[in-house]
Structures are given as C-alpha cells and as structure tokens.
C-alpha cells in the first residue's frame, strides 16, 4: 500500500538561495508579457461593452473608446 504525501505545507518550496540572473530576467519578461496580455484583453472587452454596462461601471462611452485605443504596453 502506497503512502500518500500531504502537500498542505508548501515549505518545501522555500529556498534561501537567490535565483540565477537568467531566471530573474526570464521571470521579469514573463510578468511583463502577462501584464500586456491583461491590458490587451481588458481593453478589447471594454470596447465590446454595451452603453448600459458602461454606465454600471461608471465609464462613459468616450472614456471606454479612449482606453480601448491605447496600445497594450501602456498603463
């Protein structure tokens, strides 16, 4: 009978050694791409919202169009 290992404790993930420079760089790039993708998706979704839904979130159609036209890399 195999014994199950409980992974409720995530302490096995804790490390005291710093990440190698290439890993830090790769992580920063991944975070940046994720941020850009979020901008792209939310702006696309904002552009598709109907006026009554924009009113619900307190955004005018002009504000929504202006935000939707921003490039994905801008905050």
Image (cartoon, rainbow, N blue to C red):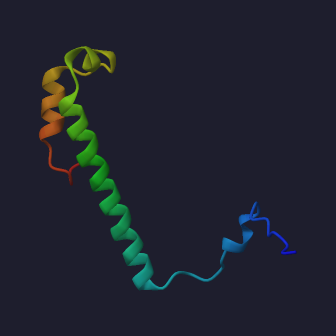
Which residue is pictured at 21% across the width and 50% down the height?
74
Q: Quadrant of residue 30?
A: bottom left
Residue 12 x, y percent position in the rendering: 72, 73
Residue 37 x, y percent position in the rendering: 28, 53
Figure check: 60 above or below 30? above
Which residue is pictured at 14% across the width and 43% down the height?
70
Which residue is pictured at 13% across the width and 33% down the height?
66
**Left or right: where 68 falls relative to 8:** left
Residue 75 appears in the rendering: no
**Left or right: where 71 falls relative to 20:** left
Residue 62 x, y percent position in the rendering: 13, 24
Residue 49 appears in the rendering: yes
Q: Quadrant of residue 27?
A: bottom left
Foreground of the two, 3 or 56:
3
Q: Quadrant of residue 53?
A: top left
Figure check: 44 above or below 19? above
Which residue is pictured at 79% across the width and 70% down the height?
5
Outermost residue to the front: 1
Figure check: 42 above or below 15? above
Residue 51 x, y percent position in the rendering: 20, 17
**Left or right: where 17 falls relative to 54:** right
């Amino acid at each position: 009978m195999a014994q199950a290992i409980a992974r409720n404790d995530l302490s096995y993930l804790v490390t005291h050694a710093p990440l190698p420079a290439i890993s830090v760089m790769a992580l920063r790039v991944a975070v940046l791409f994720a941020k850009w993708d979020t901008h792209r998706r939310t702006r696309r979704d904002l552009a598709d919202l109907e006026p009554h839904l924009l009113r619900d979130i307190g955004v005018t159609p002009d504000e929504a169009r202006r935000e939707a036209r921003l490039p994905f890399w801008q905050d």
